[in-house]
Amino acid sequence: MNIKILSSGNKEIFPFAKPIGIGLIDTAINLTRICLFDKPDFLLFIGSAGSYGNLKTLDIITTSSASNIENCFFEKKCYTPIENIITFNNVSRETIINSSNYITTDENIAKKYLKINIEAENMEFFSVVKTAKEFNIPVKGIFVITNYCNKFAHNDYLKNINIAKEKLINHLIEQNIIKEKNG
């Protein structure tokens, strides 16, 4: 089975994962290229996520569900004609990861995501799930929480990313997804 492990890049580089870019656009472009020229049987996206409040720092979550809801939605200052919550497996009660090209730093907005059952954010995952669905490739995401979505989000991310990466690698080894740290 051709399993492709993906990550965003920048601070989230792993020897066993293909970096596909940061944010929604680069991710969609680069993952489409992979699917067209070397279509995998399964996609696994790994990385960090920010918690809207319920998940704790260094928690690990696995999901196939993503959303693309912008903060302006909660202020009734925008709308979208696109499907903005998707899942590959149609599993209910799965953790939903929200994706945007922006990081939420307002705790009050973060609480509004929780009210609609969205637990965390990762800038790329919606693009990954949407692209996987388009190519009919099963997909999962495994994320380590590095920060809460508040005014300290970026500083906490920087403080926790190396510990989170190590925890993620150990989880992948425990789950027999990879055999060793170098893949």
Image: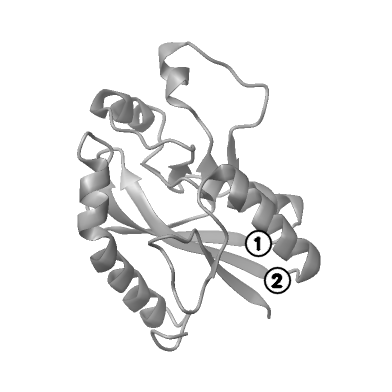
| 4 horizontally vs 137: left or right | left
Query: Under tag 2, what secondary structure?
Result: loop
Res 7 label: none
Q: CA distance from mark 1 to mark 2?
A: 7 Å
* Displayed quadrant of residue 152: top left
* Other-residue count near label 1 (Cα within 10 Å), few / some / many at <14 / 14–19 / ≥20: some
- Circles 1, 2 touching at the beta carbon (< 8 Å): yes
Residue 156 at x, y = what percent? 21, 49
The residue type indicated by label 1 comes to Pro
Q: Residue furthest bottom?
A: 179
Give coordinates of residue 73: x percent, y percent: 47, 19
Which residue is at a point 66% across and 57% down the rendered structure image?
A: 30
Report x, y in % for residue 71: 42, 24
Name which residue lies at 41% across and 37% down. Answer: 118
Nearest the viewer among 169 and 21 is 21
Could you tell me which quadrant the N terminus lies in? Answer: bottom right
Name the N-terminal-most of marks 1 and 2.
2
Relative to 165, 64 lies left or right: right
Q: Is 125 placed left or right of 169 in the picture?
A: right
Circle 1 is placed at which residue position? 138
Give the residue displayed 41% in from the left and 13% down from the top: 75
**Residue tagged 2:** 41
On screen, residue 107 above or below 20:
above
